Image (spheres, rainbow, N blue to C red):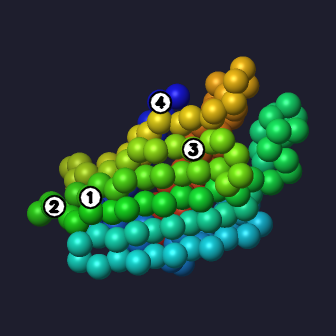
Amino acid sequence: MKFIEQHQYDAPPAAVWSMLSDRGFREEVCRATGARQWDVDVSTDEGGGTIRVRRVIPARVSDAVKRFVGETVTIVQTEQWGPATPDGARTADLHLEVEGQPAAMTGAHSLAAQGGGTAFEVAGDLKVSIPLLGGKIEKEIAKAVSAGLAEEHKLGVRYLS
């Protein structure tokens, strides 16, 4: 299943990158999205870096899907960011997996200068490898990822103001 989510920030890409690579910001996103446990690892330099967030969250899915995944799910998100272009734009390879389940998303993050702000995009392919139920579960996961990104955006707007 194709997944695309876009958000705008009223700050330049360098400021958004600084926010996204701030361990404290990522931990605040974990708290705000209801994570019960989390581990944030940020390793960056001038050339980009790696951000890995592992969080245990309540399974906010239908009862039918919850029987399959349980009361909580562990999401591991890994972003491999490249260097900034002259205007501050950056891209990252993205891998998101549901630990212990046949569910993953691969794709990319991008930060692009747009006017005086930044366009932030997440695009990827979400795949649940379960016959008959995979498509239904993909839609539920996509809703959860979208809700998490909306909360991250809300916190990001506050962080950048």
Classify mark 3: helix, strand or loop. strand
Mark 4 and mark 2 lie on one chain; the one further toward the N terminus is 4
The residue indicated by pointer 1 is 90
Mark 4 vs mark 2, foreground winner is 4
Q: How far apart are marks 4 and 3 (CA)?
A: 12 Å
**Circle nearer the N terminus (3, 1):** 1
Q: Residue 2 carries which label?
A: 4
Query: Which of disc 2 and disc 1 is earlier in sequence?
Result: 2
The label shown at residue 104 is 3
Viewer-nearest residue: 126 or 161 = 126
Q: Residue at x 66, y 41 (%)?
A: 102
Distance Cα–Cα, label 3 vs label 1: 23 Å
Few, some or many residues within 10 Å of mark 4 (<14, 14–19, 20+): few
**Tag 1 and tag 2, C-beta contact below 8 Å:** yes
Identify the residue under disc 2.
85
Indicate which label's residue lies in the foreground, 4 or 3: 3
Location of residue 60 by image quarter:
top right
Distance, label 3 to label 2, CA atoms, is 29 Å
CB-based contact (under 8 Å), mark 4 and mark 3? no
Label 3 crowd (10 A; few <14 / some 14-19 / many >=20): many
Amino acid at circle 2: Thr
